[in-house]
Image: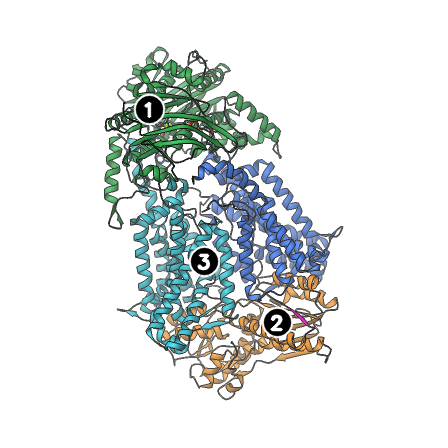
Chain colours: A green, B blue, C cyan, D orange
Amino acid sequence: MTDPILSLSDVHKSFGPIEVLHGVNFALRPGEVHALIGENGAGKSTTMKILAGYLSQTDGEVIFEGNPIRFDHSDEAEDLGIIMIHQEFNLAEHLAVDQNIFLGRELKKGWRLDHGEMRRRSAELLQRLDCRVDPATQVNRISVPDKQMVEIAKALSRDARVLIMDEPTAVLTERETEVLFEQIERLREQGVAILYTSHKLSEVKRIADRVTVLRDGTMVRSGMVEEFSEHDMATAMVGRELSDLFPPKAEGGAETVLEVRNVSVPGMVENASLNLHRGEVLGIGGLVGSGRTELAEAIAGLRPRDGEVTVKGTALPPGDISAAVKAGLVYLTEDRKGAGLLLEKTLRENLTLPLLSEFGNPLINRRKEEAALSKAIEDFAIRAPDRGMAVGDLSGGNQQKLLLAKTLLSNPEIVIIDEPTRGIDIGTKQQIYQLIADLAAEGRSIIVISSEMPELIGLADRVVVMHSGEITGEVSGADVNEQRIVKLAMGMDAEPEGTAA
Amino acid sequence: MTDATAKKPAARRSSVNLQAIGPVVALIVLVLIGISLSDNFLSYANVTNVLARSAFIGIIAVGMTFVITAGGLDLSVGSMAAFVAGVMIIAMNAMTERMGVTLPVVLLGMLIALFSGFAAGMINGLLITRAGIEAFIVTLGTMGIYRSLITWLADGGTLSIGYQMGEFYRPVYYGGIAGISWPIIVFALVAIIGEIAMRHTAFGRHCAAIGSNEKVARYSSVAVLRVRLITYALLGLLVGLAVVMYVPRLGSASSATGLLWELEAIAAVIIGGTLLKGGFGRVWGTVVGVLILSLIGNILNLTDFVSPYLNGAIQGVVIILAVVLQRNTGPAR
Amino acid sequence: MTDATAKKPAARRSSVNLQAIGPVVALIVLVLIGISLSDNFLSYANVTNVLARSAFIGIIAVGMTFVITAGGLDLSVGSMAAFVAGVMIIAMNAMTERMGVTLPVVLLGMLIALFSGFAAGMINGLLITRAGIEAFIVTLGTMGIYRSLITWLADGGTLSIGYQMGEFYRPVYYGGIAGISWPIIVFALVAIIGEIAMRHTAFGRHCAAIGSNEKVARYSSVAVLRVRLITYALLGLLVGLAVVMYVPRLGSASSATGLLWELEAIAAVIIGGTLLKGGFGRVWGTVVGVLILSLIGNILNLTDFVSPYLNGAIQGVVIILAVVLQRNTGPAR
Amino acid sequence: QTIGVSIPAATHGWAGALNYHAERTVERLEETYPDMDFVLTTTSDPGTQVSDLEDMVATRGIDALVVLPFESEPLTGPIQRIAESGTWVTVVDRGLAQDGIEDLYVAGDNMSFGQTAGQYFVDNLDSGAKLVVMRGIPSTVDNERVEGFEAALEGSDLEVLAMDHANWNRDNAFTLMQDYLSRFSEIDAVWAADDDQAVGALAAIEQAGRSGEMIVVGGAGMKEMVDRIRNGDETVPVNVTYPPSMISTAIEMTAVGASGAAPMTGEFIIASELITQDNAEDYYFEDSPY
Ligand SMILES: Nc1ncnc2c1ncn2[C@@H]1O[C@H](COP(=O)(O)OP(=O)(O)OP(=O)(O)O)[C@@H](O)[C@H]1O
Ligand SMILES: Nc1ncnc2c1ncn2[C@@H]1O[C@H](COP(=O)(O)OP(=O)(O)OP(=O)(O)O)[C@@H](O)[C@H]1O
Ligand SMILES: O[C@@H]1[C@@H](O)[C@H](O)OC[C@H]1O
Ligand SMILES: [Mg+2]
Ligand SMILES: [Mg+2]
């Protein structure tokens, strides 16, 4: 076995008075893919940031090639070839894709920037990742998964000896995940040490050589991947036995609560029509960029659109989100950081933002807000070391839970959830699936947009599939299976018989 | 270990406290300097003078706090005040001719001032929210427009309220109840209501949300455009209110009225701890900021400093120092 | 795999184009208005006048573009210009006494101006980056300080360069090569270098990155504080350069020198399409903005509008319109 | 004895000279009268001036006030109250809107300032001559001057081609003059109305190479202008006085009055004189800053 290149020895980390890492040990070896798994808030991101020099440990040591090392700045780590992809995007939104990829490491011809070369290499990197974005596009115009690919391209553009990736696949579909894994394989062969986190345990099983499990800031288990089944991993993470991930599917009633007729969003969605019944969980599948998000946003009044959206017989005016909310229709965004949460504000302020009028008029009843927060923390198992902290300091998964709580606060009748479990640990996922089932059982109707095939299949009774901005088909009942969905998503099977069953 | 992120929570907590007391400390220091320089500093007359004259900028700055918190800016308030004062005076003079020196004329005059301010604010707000033009440009434009209009209304000179009417209206600035003069009372009320609105109402929350991240606010079904529009209209209304207190003080308006008030109001807001980029606002901080600015002028008048030419320099230094006190170390933009 | 992606660039290009041509269209419209109103508008003399007088604000505005792109602001440039001009004149007068009316005195004077500007900019930059005080407050403070200092240096009056020296130095403003006057040449050079620096150097790229997201820039190992400091120092240096061109024009400086230049410079930058909140800057846009502002004044002087009192109003309207042209529809902040 | 002095800030040349004189006089008098105290404030808008006056009364307990009102109307009420409380009041330059408030009035005469210049043009220009006019900062002072000027031109056949504001500022005047020169091929005279404006206008005329085509008359008696007149400069034949040193006169008279040496009440109007080559010597003060 090769010597570790980078390791942690008894590392502790406190934020203010709260210690979140209680003595973490583990080592990264060249040519090895090491998976770090654990529940939301277990300390994975914190551990990674310490390794990459973005945070300093309060106690213990970071050891690089056998010597203790202290990074004064992430630059120093980067100079040693330690590269990290953060869980949250680190892209300058106003800059173009290629400008971001080479930010801080611009290529030059003399004193001048070498635009051509940077663009060429960016294109090359993106192509290697099978990502179609034009390197000249401004980052604020590309989709969330594309941003992730840009992040990956940015990391690949640096000469990494250690590559640390914090949930790189959370926002990717299986297809892109495949592409990423090919790259990981390639790097592994080149002798790069790779640290990787994911809540998708099947992925871990597939790609990792070694697995370390964190629970509450403590390392509970570490070993070669062969020693773990997916079930073992989940149990080690959560600290208890997990029952079935998916609750039994609810069958929707006959009453149509939401009718979408010929909705188009210029350049993104064309003539989409669908129905949603009371008590139903409807899935929307498709590849990245197929326009699912745009369709959902158009329905929810967040985008200008053509076509008709009717909630229980009443037409919703386009582009009017408050009308949609009033009609009982809400949308949970896939863009947590950009559109979901106010990162500098507290949990309470975020939770009640969409529904402030319910919390007292004209004066907000603070106690009622606190009560709502307590309930949300309990219902959604939000782990916040401190109730008064800024949401940006929550772990990624806990932010997602808060976003869910916020969206569902108004007790909506129709919920469109875009990537509901993005970055959520397996234990909580189960809770959220249960919650969705419960909502349906209460007679609410849910649309789930998900890039996780098992999630779609496990939750939805009926799945609508999009390709290139158009709805290419619908499957239901026993037809809800991976093969059918993938075919439709690739645009290979648009015949009506697909929907017949 | 230099990493800023690492220190953040600790720094954040302590900096919140420091930020909170920063301007207050500066204010206290100024008061102590004042006391040490002159026995009359704490006299009833001086305290009343300083507070009453702070009222104009103060009332406007409270409105500015909302605009800035919501990520906006208004450079036009100074000229708007001059313009509104001009309109009010012309209207009152015209009405006095017909109705004599009577209370209804004063009340109507006040209404006209409030309404003109509100309308002017609405115009700014509509251009910003509906036409989608950068607030800086819109209000730079209207700043020039209102300043021109008052110059034109006054024919390059001064618009004055009739002498009799002036005397009749005077008590609105110089009078008061229980020894507290009206401008102080009105300023205090505006500040208190403003503070409550900022911290305890949906409107205040929405302003902060919009300033913090407009897209998140929109996705949270906050009526972004409407809230933003309201901040400008509200600021206009408060400019009108400031004018209602200002006109009885000087009884006139000219192209020199309200000069640089916008800078003073914005400075007071920022000194008070509101973020210029938006997302966080503090009305009581603004009040402290206004008082700091007023006190600098007052203290400079208490003694003979080196040269009156250098007043501006001292003012500049104090403004910077007042803010140094509240920022700990972390570099800002 | 998706044609949605394919359609995207097209949409983007059209909106970029509109933004890009917006100010140019406004400029062309103004030129056409100028031509239609006065036969002399396109005369060599008038064109030279307008361009040369734009040079001061123009040179400063190019520097301001970098400051604003990096998410900063500088309110002090007008008073800084006055102060630097004062220092330069005093120094040149002192040197003339000893060294006579000679070229070295002029060159040394220029060096002193450039250096004072640079130093003043550094002070702003250090207070902002090291002491971590909001740029608005720092430069509001130094604005007052420099303005006071020039008043004090000039003893309230005007500092004038000695007559002989003034005559000797004059050609730097009035002279030129091949019929193009020096200020125009220098302005053009500054603009071209600025445009190149913004678009083709790492410095320009880093300014945009910092203005767009400071944390991202820091994580990408951009030396945030240093780049930001450089923007202010560079702006100071350019203020010095503007002064080098300004002093030979009238040979004097007073407390009225450079009044409101900061507003004009910032307005030019924003009209040109640079984002006030930072993240995107366009030097050539700034040049167009400066020309628009100069042309408005020129056209107003070349014709008789209703009342000269209303010049400011017309200016305001044109500024707003110039920007309306460039924003398509989407509401801004 | 405390004497308060409140004047506009040094925002343009003339006001700067006013500040200069006020400061020197205060220094000098503080030495002459050791038991006399002076408070000097400068302001750039009427509102602040009222605040300064309030501060003088409330915190400095002034016995006498010398004030150059930034504007007449807004300062009338506040000054009246100070006068009513028994404080001695000397008003300088810009009179109050009500008669009989001040104890002493020291002033120049703005109507006559404009009239004197206008009369000079009427008397010395050929009939049909063409003029351009630069106005100051829009204000009562400026209005009175223009009124006087227009009154003098009334009935003559001089033609005023254009009239715009240059705000008593050299740079603005330079720009404005450049544009006038582009616009009018024939200009016979420029009434710059203020010597800072004259400086700007002259520079523009020289640049355009049109020196000798027209005369330029400024105002207020700036040293450089008087010097040119003295030397028989053809472009600058005359000037009209408006001495900033009137503030010294006012402060001195007030101090004398307050010290009880002699009663000093009434009006002291310093007429606007025409400076010509003949009398220029009398108006040239080598060490005046203005
Ligand atoms: N800057 C900070 N200030 C305060 N607390 C923090 C900060 N950063 C992280 N924490 C806390 O530290 C704990 C560990 O967070 P971390 O982000 O490492 O979790 P994680 O394992 O990556 O979780 P997830 O799966 O949700 O991403 C959490 O409780 C989080 O709230
Ligand atoms: N603001 C925008 N401007 C221009 N194009 C955009 C914008 N937002 C998204 N797009 C593009 O629209 C297409 C659809 O993106 P969208 O995010 O809706 O896909 P999706 O089907 O929801 O898949 P996923 O959510 O997995 O990304 C993408 O090609 C994306 O790049
Ligand atoms: O302030 C005025 C000054 O600028 C002008 O030149 O002369 C008269 C003064 O009152
Ligand atoms: Mg994490
Ligand atoms: Mg999506």
Q: Is residue B56 visible?
A: yes
B311 relative to A271 in the view: left or right: right
Say whether residue D36 is magenta: yes
Nearer the observer, C43 or A419: A419
Task: Count neighbours of disc 2 (C-alpha within 10 A) and say few if under 14, some if 14 to 19, many if 20 or more.
Answer: many
Quarter containing the N terminus of chain C: top left
C94, C325: nearer the viewer: C94
The residue sitting at the front extreme is: A67
Residue C165 horizontal/vertical position (percent) = 38, 76
Q: Which residues are magenta?
A: D34-38
Q: Is residue C299 visible?
A: no
Relative image position of residue B20 (x, y in whole percent) = 58, 43
In front: label 2 or label 3: 3
Q: Is mark 2 within 8 Å of ligand 3?
A: yes
Asked which secondary structure carries label 3, the reply is helix
Give the percent coordinates (x, y) of residue B290: 60, 51
Q: Within the image, what quadrant is residue A254 found in? A: top left
State if disc 2 and disc 1 touch (CB < 8 Å).
no
Mark 1 or mark 2, whichever is nearer to me: 1
Q: Which residue is mark 1?
A: A34
Disc 2 to disc 3, how far (Cα)? 32 Å
Q: Is-magenta flag for residue A119?
A: no
Q: In the shown orientation, is residue C140 left or right of residue C201? A: right
* Residue that numbered label 3 is attached to: C262
* Label disc, if present, on residue D94 of the rendered structure: 2
Near mark 3 (Cα within 10 A), the count class, few <14, some 14-19 or many ≥20, is many
